[in-house]
């Protein structure tokens, strides 16, 4: 007695992009954190809208380090993309190379980010403006630090842990999360640095 | 003493009450119809006589029911917006201004006047003339409170850093009880006040009397009471105009004995209650800001005697 | 040539038996204490969520009973103001954060994989981590309460009352940090649910064949993702104001207490719907099963869920009508608050039509569903009342709103929930619950509920504000409060009868078959309780109600490996097979990570440095969590060269 059988044994045992479980998990994280950033930005605008002068009582943050950070962040998209593409080709040596380059970029902008904190011209406990500036920058920095640690661990794994195709999926999804870190920075930069000068 | 949404005594509350009866009637009819429909459906379903009702046809009926829902909601919405408009129409500028400052857990009431010495301060009791709109400017000294006299108007929050104005008009003379409606901490439950609506002449007499400085004590015991009030910690917080007492963070006591309650509506103002309150305020209203001041019983009696003649 | 051919094969009894054995072995639950802590079986995690949430429900109920005793007579001395304020805060916080959200999350974790025909949940370790965080948060809250640092500023914790100036001590911090715990749990639960629904549906289960409960949980999960960050922001800003001297809500330094209210209610109103929507899914499930016919208006019901979710984000200001906001804005929120009644109405009409055209069986779950109609419709009507600004200004923050919200949440969510727990009891335990005890529970709860909460409408109109620890005699509130106390006693008996039913039925209940209620969804196609791998053999889905309508010769799915925890990943829209995936093995590190995260979060109530130094241990445990071990390695792609032949299929267009 025979039955109809759907044979799935020849399907691949891993997949990249929106077909993978990890991609969707990453998207979920991005949605959550994107919402948080959005609400933070709205809170910034809300506080700004309540007072006649902005920034109230303090000079806006200095442009230099914020802008340098922005440039490094944007530039780091390149090794990030190269790592992602290498991963999707299962090209372990190149993925390893570019992910390490990404780590170096990330460390570089952590340094400039630290300098950025010293030129905000306001403390978090000065007034509500200072609080929201520090909160916005701090939240983004927390994402950056998390991503560096995450990428660092992954890079280390590529050096010493057994590598299967799933590690390459990890590299690719780590890259999509990093794009979010970049993308979320740009509106924050506009709010913190340009809005007080232009509006 | 009235504290009810459904016993309105002022134009604002009356408008809301009429809105209430409108929505109440409409929703009651809708509820009865829907539950009757459910009952019919369950009866039919229990018999399990599936007559092969087509889903298409049922969906059409669901659509019709949905459309009726929209119409009903729209009617309620329109009426609600008209009520809001009507309520707002009381907002006129050229009216008597009363500033109410909410404290944890009492209300300071100040009748505004261009000349500072003509201003009147009292606590937990508002007098208003019947038939005249008054503007109540609400401020909060510490946390958020909400000013609510159900028989006269809906509530409005007093929020630190924000100023809110509530317009109300009493159309019937009477005593209307109100209470803080926003949770404000320990003694939120004991933060009541009364609004006394009286004929304009009575109101005028009342406010003239309130403008005077405090009565001079007559009898020796009353004089001793005043002396104690001025020597002891009372003056740090309370004001009694015409004496050395000038503290601003507690109720103004200048005409204390004209008020009907103590401790923000917690107890009727009788000599016994006043005495008990002074002897241990924390027992009556735990957590309130008034400290217990050690006083000999006869000293306390003197203070009560003095306070009771502050008419 | 297709990667997934349908072929005629002989599938022998021996083959099925040996595959079942292999599956039971590879999906076996680990033993011992370490095994308990390493659990990744979604059924175990789901049950833990449900049971823990029910324990918190019982605790919240005890707190409610204390309040009713205190208010039964005027000027009662039973609880002082200090304790009463803690009790009502704990009650609200418990019911919202430790019961209502987690219990539905637990149901989702348990039933979504079963309903979509999957062998497990996506990201099971994350789900386990979520559970441990939820448990830690709940235990933390109650330990704090007993250590006298339980919160006392209401479940909404408004500033400035909860801010640094007016709430010295740690009570407010406890509340704010509890939010962090429960939000982490809810958010990971939402991700897990979404990914499972999107990627783990059995072949043939296209989106338009998904069970209504899965739709409800999908929509709810998206709401969680967009709503929860707001309250995290509110509670984090609150804690920063308290701990490091920021001024977000300090009006003296340019902050604003109203900003807190906006953030809180931007979460707080959707919160109501993310309790209510899963219950709507349960209602559709129960009504379909006990009317013995497919649900009427499937598309309308799904649309109603989605519409409710969207509108749910446009109502938050109706909690702030008394805050003196501009009138034009409030009119918009009035309109939105009334319009949300439309999708609820459509759902109710669809259910009535289903009952009308079906063969109704008045089993206990159906009674709870009918109880929903009576209670929720009343709550919906008072909802229309509070949506009207003028009326709301009178009844806001009074017992009228207490009545309204309990009619909506208990009628709209708890009644369907109890119905569903009775309904699914045989699936959880393999035994039938007692019908007679179920009837007793229903009537005690139904009568007790109405006796408790109906008088509160009148109390509110008579001017009784919420959150008062006592009241004076002579205001016309005594009788109504006494009635409420009596009703509460009946409800307590009702809850007790449910516990008795569970215990008795667990021991002596009749053994349950696979599908004792003759339902249509997939969880009833496997044994009660299900095996660790949920299903074998699995058939391709052919209709919306597979157990009623699928032809008997639907193809069997073969080729998912049985020698490891492998699942079939399918495509988002059409559920076509896409790839095979090695689901994570049991692992103790999610538990350890949760322990260290707990330490960090509690430490951060005392010093901001706890965030810096306290983050290091969880980070290390996270590395251990994700570090690939031999059992985790995908042996079909290790070393990587072995994976090359699959590369085209793994990266090609989906």
Image (tube, rainbow, N blue to C red):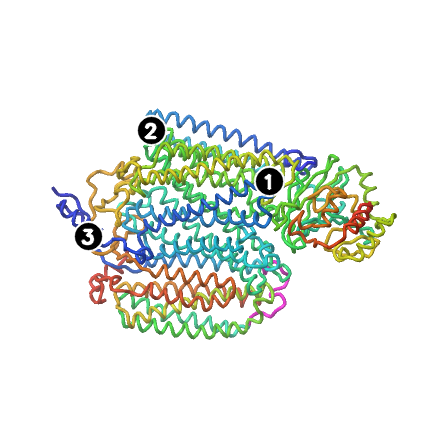
Disc 3 and disc 1 in contact, CB within 8 angstroms: no
Quarter of the image containing the N terminus of chain B?
top right
The residue depicted at 50 percent of the width and 58 percent of the height is: C233
Number of other residues with Cα within 10 Å of mark 2, as a class: few under 14, some 14 to 19, many 20 or more: many
Q: Residue C22 carries which label?
A: 3
Q: How far apart are marks 2 and 3 (CA)?
A: 42 Å
Residue A132 in the image: x percent, y percent? 55, 63
Q: In this view, does B227 lie above or below C309?
A: below
Residue C494 in the image: x percent, y percent? 44, 36
Residue B309 in the image: x percent, y percent? 82, 46
- Asked if residue B88 shows in the view, the reply is no
Q: Distance between the residues labelled 3 and 1?
A: 63 Å
User: For this rendering, which residue is in front, C189 or C342?
Assistant: C189
> Disc 2 marks which residue?
C359
Q: Are marks 3 and 1 on the same chain?
A: yes
In primary-sequence order, the first of circles 1 and 2 is: 2
Q: Residue C395 carries which label?
A: 1
Q: Distance between the residues labelled 1 and 2?
A: 42 Å
- Asked if residue C477 shows in the view, the reply is yes
The residue depicted at 79 percent of the width and 54 percent of the height is: B229
Span shown in magenta: A47-61
SS for callout 1: helix
In primary-sequence order, the first of circles 3 and 1 is: 3
């Amino acid at each position: 007695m025979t039955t109809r059988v759907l044979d799935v044994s020849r399907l691949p045992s891993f997949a990249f992009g929106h077909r993978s479980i990890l991609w969707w998990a990453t998207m979920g994280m991005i949605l959550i954190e994107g919402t948080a950033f959005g609400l933070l930005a709205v809170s910034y605008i809300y506080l700004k809208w309540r007072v006649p002068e902005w920034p109230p009582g303090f000079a806006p943050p200095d442009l230099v380090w914020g802008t340098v950070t922005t440039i490094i962040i944007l530039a780091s998209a390149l090794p990030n993309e190269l790592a992602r593409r290498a991963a999707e080709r299962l090209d372990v040596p190149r993925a390893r190379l570019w992910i390490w380059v990404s780590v170096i970029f990330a460390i570089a902008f952590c340094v400039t980010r630290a300098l950025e904190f010293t030129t905000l011209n306001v403390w978090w406990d000065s007034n509500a403006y200072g609080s929201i500036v520090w909160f916005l920058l701090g939240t983004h920095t927390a994402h950056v630090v998390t991503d560096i640690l995450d990428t660092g661990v992954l890079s280390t794994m590529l050096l010493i842990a057994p590598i299967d195709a799933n590690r390459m999926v990890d590299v690719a999804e780590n890259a999509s999360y990093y794009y979010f870190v970049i993308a979320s920075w740009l509106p924050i930069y506009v709010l913190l640095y340009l809005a007080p000068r232009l509006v | 003493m009235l504290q009810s949404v459904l016993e309105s005594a002022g134009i604002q509350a009356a408008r809301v009450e009429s809105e209430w009866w409108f929505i109440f009637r409409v929703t009651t009819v809708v509820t009865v119809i829907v539950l009757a429909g459910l009952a019919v459906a369950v009866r039919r379903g229990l018999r399990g006589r599936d007559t092969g009702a087509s889903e298409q046809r049922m969906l059409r009926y669901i659509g019709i029911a949905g459309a009726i829902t929209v119409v009903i909601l729209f009617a309620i919405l329109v009426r609600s917006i008209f009520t809001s408009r009507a309520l707002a129409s009381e907002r006129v500028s050229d009216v008597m201004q009363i500033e109410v400052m909410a404290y944890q857990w009492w209300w300071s009431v100040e009748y505004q006047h261009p000349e500072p010495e003509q201003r009147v301060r009292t606590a937990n009791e508002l007098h208003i003339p019947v038939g005249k709109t008054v503007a109540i400017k609400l401020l909060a000294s510490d946390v958020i409170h909400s000013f609510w006299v159900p028989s006269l108007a809906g509530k409005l929050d007093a929020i630190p850093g924000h100023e809110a104005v509530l317009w109300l008009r009493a159309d019937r003379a009477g005593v209307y009880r109100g209470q803080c409606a926003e949770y404000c901490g320990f003694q939120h439950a004991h933060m009541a006040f009364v609004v006394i609506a009286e004929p304009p002449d009575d109101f005028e007499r009342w406010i003239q009397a309130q403008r005077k400085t405090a009565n001079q004590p007559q009898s020796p015991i009353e004089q001793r009471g005043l002396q104690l009030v001025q020597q002891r910690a009372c003056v740090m917080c309370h004001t009694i105009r015409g004496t050395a007492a000038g503290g601003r963070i507690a109720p103004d006591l200048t005409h204390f004995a004209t008020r009907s309650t103590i401790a923000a509506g917690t107890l009727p103002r009788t000599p016994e209650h006043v005495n008990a309150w002074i002897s241990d305020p924390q027992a009556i209203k735990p957590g309130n800001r008034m400290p217990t001041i050690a006083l000999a019983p006869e000293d306390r009696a003197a203070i009560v005697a003095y306070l009771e003649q502050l008419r | 040539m297709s990667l997934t051919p349908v072929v005629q094969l002989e599938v022998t009894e021996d083959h099925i038996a040996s595959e079942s054995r292999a599956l039971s072995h590879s999906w076996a639950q680990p033993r011992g204490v370490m095994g308990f802590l390493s659990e990744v079986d979604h059924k175990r995690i789901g049950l833990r969520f449900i049971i823990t949430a029910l324990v918190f429900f019982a605790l919240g109920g005890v707190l409610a009973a204390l309040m009713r005793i205190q208010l039964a007579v005027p000027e009662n001395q039973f609880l002082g103001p200090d304790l009463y304020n803690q009790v009502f805060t704990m009650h609200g916080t418990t019911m919202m954060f430790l019961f209502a959200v987690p219990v539905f999350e637990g149901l989702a974790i348990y039933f979504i994989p079963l309903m979509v025909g999957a062998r497990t949940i996506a990201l099971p370790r994350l789900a386990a981590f979520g559970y441990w965080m939820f448990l830690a948060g709940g235990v933390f809250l109650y330990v704090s309460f007993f250590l006298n640092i339980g919160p006392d500023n209401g479940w909404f914790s408004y500033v400035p009352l909860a801010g640094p100036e007016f709430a010295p001590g740690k009570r407010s911090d406890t509340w704010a940090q509890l939010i962090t715990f429960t939000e982490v749990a809810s958010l990971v639960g939402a991700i897990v649910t979404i990914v499972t629904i999107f990627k783990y549906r059995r072949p043939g289960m296209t989106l338009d064949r998904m069970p209504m409960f899965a739709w409800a949980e999908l929509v709810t999960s998206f709401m969680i993702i967009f709503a929860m960050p707001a309250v995290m922001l509110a509670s984090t800003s609150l804690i920063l104001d308290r701990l490091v001297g920021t001024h977000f809500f300090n009006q003296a330094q340019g902050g604003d207490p109203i900003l807190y209210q906006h953030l809180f209610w931007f979460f707080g109103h959707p919160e109501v719907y993310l309790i209510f929507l899963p219950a709507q899914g349960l209602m559709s499930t129960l009504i379909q099963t006990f009317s013995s016919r497919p649900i009427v208006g499937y598309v309308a019901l799904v649309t109603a869920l989605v519409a409710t979710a969207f509108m749910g984000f446009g109502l938050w200001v109706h909690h702030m009508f008394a805050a003196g906001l501009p009138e034009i804005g409030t009119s918009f929120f009035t309109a939105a608050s009334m319009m949300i009644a439309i999708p609820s109405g459509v759902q109710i009409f669809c259910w009535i039509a289903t009952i009308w055209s079906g063969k109704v069986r008045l089993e206990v779950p159906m009674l709870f569903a009918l109880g929903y109609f009576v209670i929720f419709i009343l709550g919906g009507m008072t909802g229309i009342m509070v949506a009207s600004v003028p009326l709301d200004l009178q009844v806001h923050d009074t017992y009228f709103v207490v009545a309204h919200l309990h009619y909506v949440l208990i009628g709209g969510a708890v009644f369907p929930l109890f119905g569903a727990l009775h309904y699914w009891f045989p699936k959880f335990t393999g035994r039938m619950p007692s019908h007679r005890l179920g009837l007793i529970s229903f009537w005690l709860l139904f009568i007790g509920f109405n006796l408790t909460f109906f008088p509160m409408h009148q109390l509110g109109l008579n001017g009784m504000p919420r959150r008062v620890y006592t009241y004076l005699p002579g205001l016309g509130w005594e009788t109504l409060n006494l009635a409420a106390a009596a009703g509460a006693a009946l409800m307590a008996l009702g809850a007790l009868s449910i516990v008795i039913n569970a215990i008795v039925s667990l021991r002596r209940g009749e053994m349950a078959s696979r599908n004792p209620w003759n339902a249509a969804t997939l969880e009833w196609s496997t044994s009660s309780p299900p095996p660790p791998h949920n299903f074998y053999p699995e058939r391709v889905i052919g209709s919306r109600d597979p157990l009623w309508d699928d032809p008997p010769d639907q193809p069997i799915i073969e080729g998912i490996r049985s020698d490891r925890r492998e699942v079939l990943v399918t495509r988002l829209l059409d559920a076509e097979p896409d790839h095979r995936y090695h689901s994570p093995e049991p692992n103790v590190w999610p538990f350890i990570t949760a322990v260290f995260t707990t330490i960090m979060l509690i430490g951060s109530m005392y010093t901001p440095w706890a965030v810096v130094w306290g983050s290091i241990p969880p980070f290390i445990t996270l590395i251990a969590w994700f570090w690939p071990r031999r059992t985790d390695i995908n042996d079909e792609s290790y070393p990587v060269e072995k994976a090359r032949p699959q590369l085209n299929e793994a990266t090609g267009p989906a």
